[in-house]
Amino acid sequence: MSRQEAVDLAVIQELKEVMGADFPRLVVSFVKDGEQRLRAIQGGLVAADVEVVRQQAHSFKGSSGNLGAVRVSALCLEMESAARDGDLAVAASLFDPLREAFESARMRLESL
C-alpha cells in the first residue's frame, strides 16, 4: 500500500465481511464523526487549546484507524504529538492535509 492511498483495502474487506449489509452505516457514522472532529480540532486551534486539539486528534486517530483510513490516522498521530508537545503551529500546519485526507477517505469509502 502506498503512502498516498486513502484507505487500507484489506481492513475494509474484513469489515465488510464482518458487518455485511451494515457496512454503509459504519461509513456514514465515520463521516459524521469525522466532520465533528474536524470542527472540534479547528475550534481548538482557533482557541489555542492544545488539550482539545490533542484529545480530538487522539479520538479521530482511533476511529479512522479502525476503519482503515490510514492517512487520516497517521496525520492525527502527528497532530496529537504536536499538541502534546504544545506546538500548535505544527498542529495547525497539519489541519488542511488532515481535512484533505479525510475527504479522500470519505470518497473512497462511499464508493465501496
Image (tube, rainbow, N blue to C red):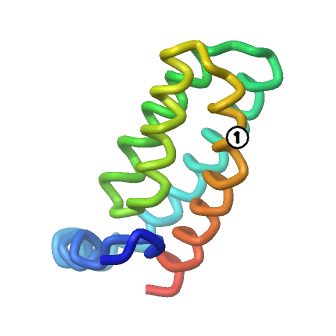
Q: Secondary structure at mark 1?
A: helix
- Identity of the residue drawn at 62% across and 19% down: 87
Q: Residue furthest bottom?
A: 111
Quarter-of-image position of residue 51: top right
- Identity of the residue drawn at 58% across and 62% down: 101
- Identity of the residue drawn at 70% across and 40% down: 93
**In the displayed structure image, the side of residue 16 where residue 49 appears, left or right:** right
| Label 1 neighbour load within 10 Å: few <14, some 14-19, many 20+ | few
* Relative to 103, residue 61 above or below: above
Horizontal and vertical percent position of residue 35: 66, 49
Horizontal and vertical percent position of residue 71: 45, 59
Q: What kind of residue is marked 1?
A: Ser
**Residue at mark 1:** 93
**In the displayed structure image, the side of residue 82 where residue 63 appears, left or right:** left
* Relative to 89, residue 77 above or below: below
**In the displayed structure image, the side of residue 62 where residue 30 appears, left or right:** right
Quarter containing the C terminus: bottom left
Quarter-of-image position of residue 106: bottom right
Quarter containing the N terminus: bottom left
* Relative to 57, residue 69 above or below: below
Horizontal and vertical percent position of residue 32: 60, 52
- Identity of the residue drawn at 51% across and 15% down: 85
